[in-house]
Image (cartoon, rainbow, N blue to C red):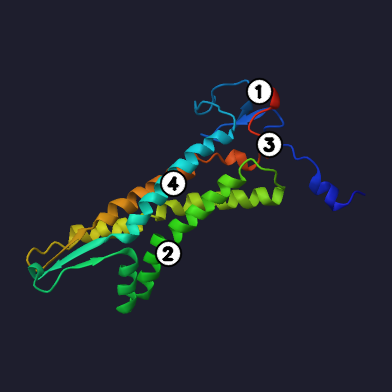
Amino acid sequence: MKPAADDAAAPIMTAHRARLIGCRGCGRVWPESQELCNRCGTQLVPPDRRCLQAVWAWMAAGIIFYIPANLFPMLRTETFAGLQGNSNATIVGGVIELVRYGNWGVALIVFAASVVVPIGKFVAITWLALAAGRPATVASAHRRLHVFEVVEFIGRWSMIDVFVVAILSALVQLGFVASIHPGPAAASFALSVAFTMLSAQSFDPRLIWRGLPLRNRRDL
């Protein structure tokens, strides 16, 4: 009986080694010679590490816009036509204000959606892009896939801060008494989230299972 180490080191049959190509639209596999998916009509493109250029580009744009999103005000509040003073709240400043007034639950949600989630996505996408196409065991490949699925799942919740600003700006318009307007950080934060989502969508998850070079040496 062979030891477990030999079994773990044994080659794993993948779609690439079986000369099959997976459709990025519906997930069905087809022979490498086929150009279009007969199920959804998507063009069949083999996994290529050159797609990581788009991943890095979109993520760099997301990071660039995330910086002013935290430096500039997210909300501008005007009360009593300015007689009682106007206030500008950044993301972190808004969280501190919520904690000061005892709204710990709302403060935690805003902090998680506006600070923890974006920074976590930057770190996760960077790790996936660095690890894509590199040799991996089955366990590490599954770990990469789980990270990718988490990034895709939480991406839809990253806009919660922008939604709060939009709702408050629409509802709190009391003219002379009080009014709330979105600050310049709202647009920067929305663009940062959009670019980060594009970065995650540009990542080809098939590279997780393909610890092979970019091309065969005969194609270089």
Identify the residue under disc 4: 60
**SS state under label 4:** helix
Q: Position of residue 194 (x, y in %)?
A: 38, 46
Quarter of the rendering containing residue 49: top right
> Is residue 162 at least partly visible in the picture?
yes
Q: How busy is the neighbourhood of tag 1: few (under 14 within 10 Å), some, or many (20 plus)?
A: few
Identify the amino acid type marked 1. Asp
Distance between mark 1 and mark 4 Cα atoms:
31 Å
Q: How busy is the neighbourhood of tag 3: few (under 14 within 10 Å), some, or many (20 plus)?
A: some
Quarter of the rendering containing residue 214: top right
Identify the residue under disc 3: 212
Q: Are marks 3 and 4 in contact (CB under 8 Å)?
A: no
Q: Position of residue 166 (x, y in %)?
A: 25, 56
Residue 112 is marked as 2
- Upstream in the sequence, badge 2 or badge 3? 2
Identify the amino acid type marked 4. Ala
Identify the residue under disc 1: 219
Picture layout, residue 6 above or below residue 173:
above
Q: Are marks 2 and 1 in contact (CB under 8 Å)?
A: no
- Upstream in the sequence, badge 2 or badge 4? 4
Distance between mark 2 and mark 4 Cα atoms:
21 Å
Check the picture and name the quadrant holding the C terminus. Answer: top right
Q: Position of residue 74 (x, y in %)?
A: 27, 60
Which mark is in front, 2 or 3?
A: 3
Q: Is residue 79 left or right of residue 161?
A: left
Identify which residue, 5 or 68, lies in the foreground: 68
Q: Are marks 2 and 3 in contact (CB under 8 Å)?
A: no
- Upstream in the sequence, badge 3 or badge 4? 4
Residue 175 is marked as none
Picture layout, residue 41 above or below residue 144:
above
